Image (cartoon, grey):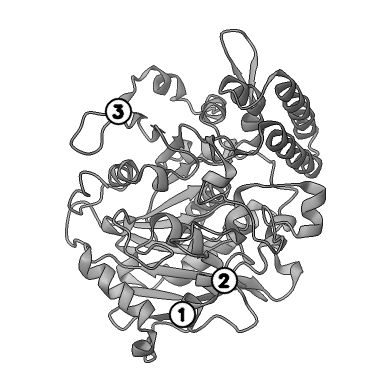
């Protein structure tokens, strides 16, 4: 990893050396040594997706277990995989441009896409070109994959594993079905290795109000969970549950835009009554989480919604840190992506700023935001696709109880047998400390990650690497015993 990290640092910090960067395709550029490629793909008229592919120096060829490629999909909607997933979670460098010891590049090639169009460096030339549904996003991503994979023998040898976080899970399952359809039609030359859903917003209703019955036959909601951990009292719980019931009714009646508005009200009520609990780790205050810290002094967007809409919808959701400041040692990710990284890439249009259209992305998907995608998970399982679900123990916005609840709604014929399987403990490092649990049956796997919030690769990097190695069956040497 030292060799790889030095190479990447040289590329970023000594950019003038690479002014002669290699043109890889009509829309892509890369480093002279071929370790990276990036570019734009026009997926529709006036709609441009930005992608960035890293190749691992650990790659092993000619083995019974082919070298994997991981496509990372961020959530939001409107959060940047190229920025956040790459520099704050699993990429080769931190936001301070120092090497990340726990990068997933150790065991797989990494493909980051700013999805949907309008996210990160991706952009549209007019608002009508923004996607309105998860399926439209999947169609755009499939178009991108066709242009990257068809005719590229190296990529075709590497099975693709789609790993998603938060709202990215909804993009992942719709993409999975779109990819399978394209493969069967002979339009896409790609091997789909599997889908992994990390703390994913698959069924909003089951996070806001879970129908999973407890021993006292009460429904679990954000309010109940927060009261149990002393962040809400009985008054706060009642206010939360009242709004949650409104949301549940709106979802049942198909009033999804209204449900999105009510969801914003519910988050605001919880933050007010809990004195600022962190939605990505309910053991923390917002100000204690470097990935979910307060928005910038300029009053920039919250959950991708412009400032005027923010006052009405009050959403401190997943995309909050699009314009937030990381801790002072890492610097501001917006400054990095609009400064040194934009200069390095060299192909970002002058009038495009990283994250500049992200608020429009969330707004365009408002009617899809609260729709469930359980049926898509069911269909993937029935088609034999390997589906991995993992959840951080102390996540609130996509709490483990909610994930467990929607899993029990699956119509997958093997669910009963899956439920009977005993969980196995997960260890990482040289000690015997329990880091999590895993349960697997046929093509469904569930990981419970202890002492982790919404951002599992950040909170438990060793466990995340171990899990990824198991999911992808990477032929790379085992990752470090402890990270």
Q: Secondary structure at mark 2?
A: loop
Residue in the foreground of this view, choosing between 388 and 355: 355
- Labelled disc at residue 121: 2
Identify which residue is drawn at 69% across, 61% down.
300
Relative image position of residue 292 (x, y in whole percent): 56, 49
Residue lying furthest top: 216
Tell us which disc is closer to us: 1 or 3. Answer: 3
Identify which residue is drawn at 24% across, 56% down.
66
In contact (CB < 8 Å): disc 2 and disc 3: no
- Count of numbered badges drawn on the protein: 3
Relative image position of residue 108 (x, y in whole percent): 30, 57
Indicate the quadrant where residue 118 lies: bottom right
- Residue position marked by numbered label 3 in the rendering: 434
Residue in the foreground of this view, choosing between 410 and 196: 196
- Labelled disc at residue 207: none
Relative image position of residue 356 (x, y in whole percent): 66, 69
Alpha-carbon span between mark 2 and mark 3:
40 Å
Indicate the quadrant where residue 375 lies: top right
Q: Is residue 388 left or right of residue 40?
A: left
Alpha-carbon span between mark 1 and mark 3:
42 Å
- Labelled disc at residue 345: 1
Residue in the foreground of this view, choosing between 328 and 369: 328
Identify which residue is drawn at 50% across, 42% down.
454
Q: Is residue 119 visible?
A: yes
Q: Secondary structure at mark 3?
A: loop
Q: Secondary structure at mark 1?
A: helix
Alpha-carbon span between mark 2 and mark 1:
11 Å
Relative image position of residue 89 (x, y in whole percent): 42, 54
Identify which residue is drawn at 68% across, 41% down.
371
Tell us which disc is closer to us: 2 or 3. Answer: 3
């Amino acid at each position: 990893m030292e060799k790889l990290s030095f190479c990447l640092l040289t590329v970023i910090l000594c950019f003038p050396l690479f002014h002669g960067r290699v043109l890889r395709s009509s829309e892509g550029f890369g480093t002279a040594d071929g370790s990276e490629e990036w570019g734009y793909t026009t997926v529709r008229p006036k709609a441009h997706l930005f992608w960035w592919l890293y190749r691992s120096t650990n790659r092993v060829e000619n083995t019974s277990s082919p070298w994997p490629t991981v496509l990372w999909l961020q959530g939001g909607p409107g959060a940047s995989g190229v920025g956040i997933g790459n520099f704050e979670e699993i990429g080769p460098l931190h936001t301070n441009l120092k090497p990340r010891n726990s990068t997933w590049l150790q065991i797989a090639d990494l493909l980051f896409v700013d999805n949907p169009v309008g996210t990160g460096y991706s952009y549209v030339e007019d608002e009508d070109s923004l996607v309105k549904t998860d399926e439209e996003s999947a169609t755009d991503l499939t178009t991108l994959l066709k242009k990257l994979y068809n005719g590229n023998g190296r990529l075709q040898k590497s099975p693709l594993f789609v790993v998603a976080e938060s709202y990215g899970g909804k993009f992942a399952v719709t993409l999975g079905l779109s990819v399978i359809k394209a493969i069967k039609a002979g339009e896409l030359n790609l091997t789909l290795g599997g889908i992994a859903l990390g703390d994913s917003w698959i069924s909003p209703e089951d996070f806001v109000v879970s129908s999973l019955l407890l021993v006292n036959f009460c429904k679990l909601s954000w309010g109940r969970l927060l009261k149990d951990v002393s962040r809400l009292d009985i008054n706060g719980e009642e206010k939360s549950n009242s709004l949650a019931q409104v949301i549940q009714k709106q979802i049942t009646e198909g009033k999804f835009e209204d449900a999105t508005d009510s969801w914003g009200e519910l988050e605001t009520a919880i933050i007010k009554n809990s004195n600022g609990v962190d939605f990505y780790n309910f053991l923390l205050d917002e100000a204690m989480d470097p990935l979910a810290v307060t928005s910038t002094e300029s009053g920039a967007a919250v959950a991708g919604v412009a400032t005027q809409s923010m006052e009405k919808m009050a959403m401190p959701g997943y995309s909050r840190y699009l314009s937030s400041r990381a801790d002072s040692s890492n610097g501001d990710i917006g400054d990095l992506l609009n400064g040194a990284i934009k200069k390095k890439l060299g192909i970002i249009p002058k009038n495009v700023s990283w994250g500049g259209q992200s608020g429009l992305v969330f707004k365009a998907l408002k009617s899809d935001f609260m729709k469930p995608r359980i049926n898509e998970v069911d269909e993937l399982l029935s088609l034999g696709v390997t589906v991995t679900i993992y959840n951080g123990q102390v996540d609130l916005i996509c709490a483990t109880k909610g994930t467990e609840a929607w899993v029990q709604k699956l119509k997958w014929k093997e669910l009963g047998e899956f439920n009977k399987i005993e969980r196995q403990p997960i260890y990482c490092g040289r000690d015997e400390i329990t880091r999590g649990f895993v349960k697997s049956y046929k093509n469904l796997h569930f990981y419970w990650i202890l002492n982790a919030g919404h951002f599992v690769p950040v909170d438990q990097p060793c466990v995340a690497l171990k899990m990824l190695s198991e999911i992808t069956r990477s032929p790379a040497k085992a990752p470090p015993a402890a990270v």
